[in-house]
Structure formats: structure tokens, C-alpha cells
Amino acid sequence: MAQRTMSLLLLLLVVHGEFISVPAKVCRLLSQPALPILSAERDINIGAIFSLHTSAVLKMHPFTSKPEPSTCVSFSLREFKFAQTLIFAIEEINNSTQLLSDISLGYKIYDACNTVAQAILSGMALMNGNDETLSNESCFRPPTVLAIVGESNSSPTMGLASVVGPFSIPLISHFATCACLSDKKRYPSFFRTIPSDYYQSRALAQLVKHFGWTWVGTVRSRNDYGNNGIAAFGTAAQQEGICIEYSEAILRTDPQSQLLKTVEVIKKATSRVVLAFMSLGDIFPLMKVIAQQNITGLQWVGSESWITSRILAETKEYRFLTGAVGFAVANAKLDGLREFLVNIHPDQQPKNELLKEFWETAFQCSFRNSRSGKVGCTGSESLAELQIEYTDASELRIASKVYTAVYAIAHTLHNILKDLKSSTNRSKGEWATPQKVLEYMRDVNFSAKTGEKIFFDASGDPMARYDLVNWQPAENGGLQFKHVGIYDSSLPSKQCLQVDQEHIVWAGNSGQLPVSVCSDSCLPGTRKAIQKGRPVCCYDCIPCAEGEISNETDSSDCFPCDLEYWSNESKDRCVLKVVEFLSYTEIMGTVLSIFSSIGALLTTMIYFVFYLHKETPVVRANNSELSFLLLFSLALCFLCSLTFIGRPTEWSCMLRHTAFGITFVLCVSCVLGKTIVVLMAFKTTLPGNNVMKWFGPLQQRLCIVSLTSIQVIICVLWLTISPPFPYMNLKHYREKIILECSLGSAIGFCAVLGYIGLLAFLCFVLAFLARKLPDNFNEAKFITFSMLIFCAVWITFIPAYVSTPGKFTVAVEIFAILASSFGLLFCIFAPKCYIILLKPDKNTRKQMMGKSASKTL
């Protein structure tokens, strides 16, 4: 450990261009130095770290002896393809006359074995070199590499970035997508050519929402890639209204019992969509158990790590993945890469055991006859005839990111050397350093042969663009990847996701979009009520209350209609409230109109009867002029009730109340006049009494005009100060509008009614006093009875008017008008008409002047 610390200290001094004089001392590594598994040293070297083996054999170290080197197993054809793509890009650059024409690039490739420890060890080897000893002279040596490409997985990359970051050595990953790596405070020298999981997680959330899946389960790798990816997805899903039923985490090293437990959770779940945010190595054990359990019918959504894996797609046991959808980095075409890949042969480097292992894995053979169950490798096998993931040049989604990472370094170096050559202040021997490469890397901007525009944002991330991939059955019985959409973060938010849904094959090779919801959608007219203790996606559908609507599916609230609107029967839209008023077309309005017309007609008929018999004693008695005027006013009373029927307008509101007040005062004034005439007539029979000269026809007219003028003045003041007006009453009923005439001034209305009541009461008192006056035809009795009816009607009208809502208020007022008018008409004129029409023998002067009490009626 002390030697390693000394090594790092010396390297730190070299990188920062400083040297501290220390005693000449040599540090020697206790363990064997890490050697590159593939290398070619030239003018400028690029480091690379790939997981050429998927796992390392775990060993327990007793810390009492020198640890043995780790043993890596399970050769990865995909990672070896990445390594060869890096070499292909370097060779292409070295053969180019436009890029680094005077400089040749070399490489040092290490195997991380898909472990954090091995990745860190490889990174330190790239910084320190391969020497077993370090001395003071080591500080004068330039760094072994100026930049590093790798690693494929997020967790090893995080460890590697933490080691090389303090030394300002640029690290460019082609496949580490964890959003946490965008933190420049923790990883100042990190870049990547693949988009961050921040964008992928948001894209997956939008995709799930697009298909209407609000109830999903998730399975993740129990590492930085899976944990951070699902955390970001959970945040985005919550914003999109998506609920996660369960979230399971596994790792490839988990025991079978843990895998079975996870599979049992998936089986029992009600969600039919499973999002697997897993690295390729972790998903294989899970898929194997699911295949053994024969679990089908699930709609799989995958992350870019495995969604374009040929090994998964070509394994017949995993046919249940048919219909899987997920985002993959955009595909690219690299001319000449396949020819380069198939030209690899172990004979090119006979001492390189890695090439032999590759050959044995590709052809499932063995160079050692001792390996049982495998045929011997002859070396004459042809990679060009082999159809495996390594030779497939149609899916270069990740390999192209290795290619662009190398070119990003090359363009950065090209820009540095170009500036150094043109600089007049260049010191002798000045050369590219990791710090300068890091500085220039931030501003690199070029167009790659893949068609991409390569540049890095402030976080070291490229622009996010994904292809939406769908797993569909292929003609050879396997599965193929179909491009069915894109996600482009550079587009407006509502246009980022574009899906060709018509060409998607769903789970079980079905053309029917799967449904995965906790609760069925709430139709318009209802709202969601979250079930207690359950996620927000689990709810009951509650109908909206009266007067409230929801016009969207899955509305969380019902919204009240405006005051003039009301909800329809289905509660999905607001309609204008029914405007209620007493109209001629409804039964009540028609009946009242008929009675009003009958009253006016009867009054007119009586008027004509009286006119035809105007010279008879019954008509001439008590001033026939007052009788005709009374009949005229009664006809107006009957007709004024018609103004209360129909849609209230500004003019009708003013007319109905003023016409009612004036005509009734005119009517009651006439009755009062007749009552006074009766009293005066009997007073004049006393000797020496000449009272009638003070209340003759002229005085009677003046009395009626004066009394009526007072009411006219009251009405004029009322209309001037605060007239009645049409008013929409929204208080009595929520579901309808009462269109009525507002009084404007309650004082004015009370004054009109009070004045009518005052005259009626005075008339009633006078008629009551004259009821026993002797006469064969004493009209005072009938006036008393008519006023009694009149007062009774209007006294009962007041509470009925106040307590009756809507159009019934108007009906009550019309009823009071008609009842009191009919009372006056029948009580005063019916007896006279009876005499005129049926008892003409009683219609004589002698009979009218009789002194005995009238008992004829």
C-alpha cells in the first residue's frame, strides 16, 4: 500500500509539472504490474478499458502473503467487438491525411472483468505505466496516455473517473449512462458519447404514458446503473401520473432463491407491464428463471443496455420477449468495420492468449485437446461465414460510440497540435498534456462519419437521441429489432417522442395494445377518488355533483359550472340553465290568462248591460257615472294581470307594477266614492240637511282624480328613483334561473300596496258603517262584503308572496289581482245585473225608494 501511495504521489507531481526533491529511493511493487491485454505504442497513446470478460473469480485474500492476480472468466464477444472497433478507428485515423497527419496514435487496452476493483487497477496502470519500480527519475516521464476510453458499465466507470479525475486525465465512456456521472464536481474529467440516463428515464416515462400504462412494475440491476436509472424514472413517472406497483433489484451474483423471489413478485403482480432497467449481464439470470417458470403475456420495456442484444433475441427460450419495446442509441453504419473484424486471427499475434480465447468462444472450439466436449480449433475457420454478434455490422449502436469517442480524442489532439504550431509563444519541447487535452475536449465540435454532430455540453454529455426499438418475430424463427419511433431531446417537449404505433407488435405477438392500469379510466362526468392506503393510480370513479362537470377522462376533480350554466345529465359539459318565468305556453300561465280574459269579458258585458239600461233606477242609483268608471277600472285590473305573464323585460317590469297600482287605486277610489255617495244620500233625507251639495258629481270626480293622482305620483317617484328591472335570480334554485322583476325599491312597492290598502280599509270602514241604512237596495252591504274579500285576499297575499319562489310568486300576485277583481265585480254588480236581467219588476223608482228594510235579495 505504501508503494502504491508513493506511485500516486510521484505521478501527481509529474502531472502538475512540479518536482519535490526527495532522497533517491526506489519503490518496488509487491504484486505483478497490470499489463495491457492489447497494445500498440506509438507517438501518442490512448488508454482503453473494456470488460472483455463478464466476471472475475472471487478470491479471499488472507493479507498474509502476496495476492495472486485475479482470474477473469466468461469471454464477452460484444466487449471484444468494442475493443476492435477502437483499434479500427485508430488505424483509420493513422491512415488519414487530414487528421493528425504527422502523428500516429497507439493504444493500450485493459480488461476490467466487469468489476470496480479491476477497473480502478487498470486505470492506475494506465497512469503509472508498467514498470515494477518507481524512483525520482520517474517524475520526469510524461504520462503514458493522454486520454482513456471506457468503461462500458456505470459502476466501474464511476470508480475509474474518481481515480483519473484528480489528475485531469480525460475519460470518455461509450456506454456508461448513469446520470450521476454528469456531476462535474465529482467527475471533472468525465465525458461520454452516449446520452445520460436522465434522458432515457424521461423518455421511458413518456413512452409508458403514451401507451396509457399507468400501473407498471420495475426490475433493476442492484448497482449504480439500475438504482439511479429507476430513481430518475420514478421521478419522471410521478410527474406523468404513472405508479410503480413493485420495484425489484437483482444482481448476476444473486443466489437462485433471490431470483425466484423476484419472479414470484412479478407473477403475483396485477400490472402487465415490466420495465427492466438492467445491464446485459444481470438480465440473463432473470430471463432464464422466467423461461423456466413459463411466464408469458407480460409486456417488457427495456433500457438501452439490453434492448438490442443479439444474444437475447436469438435465444429461442426467450421468445416471451416478443413485443418488447425500449430505447436504443441511434444506429450507425461504419464502412470497412466488418472487413476489419473478420480479418482478426490468432496467428497475427501467436503469443496473445486473448485472441485464442476469442477464437475458441466464437467457434465453440478449443486449441487444447484436453477441453472435453469441444472440437479442436484448426485456425482455418472463417469469421466471414460466422453469423454472431461479433460479425454483425447491422447493429453498431454502441460500437459506433466507441468509434466517435476515439475521433473526439483525435480531433482534440489535432486542435491542440494545430494551435501549438501556430503559437509564437510556444516554448521548446512543449507538448500535449492531459490538462490541455481536457481543456480542448470541452470545446471539441465535429461531424463524424456516422452522420452525428459530436459535441459535449457543460456536463460532458452529448445530445440525446434514441431509436424506439420493437422486438418482432423474424423469418428465421428468432427475433429482430424494428425501428418504430424516435426520441430527440433537441425537439420541443411535446414533439420529443414520435411513435409509429401501427407497426408495433405487442406481447404474445399480438396486435392489441396491452392494458396495464390499477383502476379503469374514469369517464367524463366522474372524478377520481384515491383508494385509501394505495397509490394515486388506484382509485374509484365518483360521479360529479349536481352543477359540476368533468369533461376529460381520468379527471381528478369536478369543476363547477358558471352561474348561468348547469351540468347536463351525463355531467360532462355545462349547458345554459333553464330560464324560468311564467309564460303563456305553460298550463298555469294559460289558465291565468283565460281567467283574466274572462274577467275582462264579463266586465265588458256588464258594462254593455248597464249602458243599455242606463236610464233605469238601478243603474242611475248612486251615480251611474261612478258605476261605469268602476267597470272600466275593473276591466283594466283584469287586463293588467296579463302584463305579469311572459318574459320579463325592462318595460314590462315597470308597466306591470305601475299599471297594477294605478288601476287598483282607481278601482278602490270609485268604490270609495260610491260608499260616500250612499252615506251622503241617506244623510240628505234628514230635514234641513243639504250635505249632497258638498259631494255632488263634480266633487266625486275630483275625489277620484285626487286619490288616483297620489298613486300616480308615488309610481312616478318609484320609476324615477329605483324602477323595477328584469333580474336573474340564481339563489332559490341551483339548477335553474328564475327570471323575475326585481322591485328596484322595496319602499316604492310597499308604498303602492300600502296606499291601496289604506283606501280599501277606509272604504271598508265607511261601508261597514252604512250597512244598516234603510233601503230596499242598500249597496253598502255589497260594498262591505266586497271590501272584506278584497282585504282578505291582499292580507293573505303578503306571506304567500314572500314565501313562494320563482314563477309561483308571479302566479300568487296574479291570483290576488284576479280574486280581488272578481270579488268587486260580483259583489257590487252581480245583484244589480240580477235585478236588471231577471227581476225587471224590481227595477222601478217606487221599489228603489221603499222605506222598509230590503229583503228581496
Image: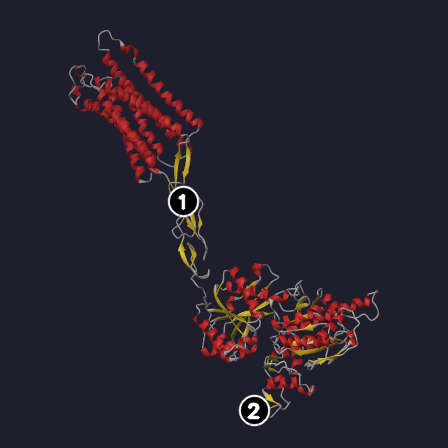
Above or below, 96 against 240 in this view is below
Secondary structure state at the residue bearing disc 2? loop
Residue 133 lies, in percent from the top left, at: 74, 80
Q: Nearer the viewer, residue 96 or 844?
A: 96
Above or below, 485 against 588 in this view is below
Q: Please name the amino acid that badge 1 sits on.
A: Lys
Q: Nearer the viewer, residue 779 or 39?
A: 39
Residue most extreme to the top: 688
Residue at 84% x, 70% y is: 428
The residue carrying pointer 2 sits among few (fewer than 14), some (14 to 19) or many (20 or more) residues within 10 Å by Cα, namely: few
Label of residue 577 in the image: 1
Q: Nearer the viewer, residue 657 or 370?
A: 370
Instruction: Please identify the quadrant where the N terminus is shown.
Output: bottom right
Residue at 45% x, 78% y is: 293
Q: Please name the amino acid that badge 2 sits on.
A: Ser
User: Which of the marked residues, 2 or 1, is nearer the chain's N terminus?
Assistant: 2
Give the residue at mark 2: 372
Question: How many labels were placed on the picture?
Answer: 2
With 683 as the anchor, is 702 left or right in this view? right
With 34 as the anchor, is 361 left or right in this view? left
Residue 163 lies, in percent from the top left, at: 67, 71
Distance between the Cα atoms at labels 2 and 1?
88 Å
State which quadrant residue 394 falls in: bottom right
Residue 791 lies, in percent from the top left, at: 28, 27
Residue 402 shows up from this direction: yes
Instruction: Please identify the quadrant where the C terminus is shown.
Output: top left
Residue 583 shows up from this direction: no
Secondary structure state at the residue bearing disc 1? loop
The residue carrying pointer 1 sits among few (fewer than 14), some (14 to 19) or many (20 or more) residues within 10 Å by Cα, namely: many
Above or below, 64 against 99 in this view is below
With 512 as the anchor, is 484 left or right in this view? right
State which quadrant residue 455 falls in: bottom right
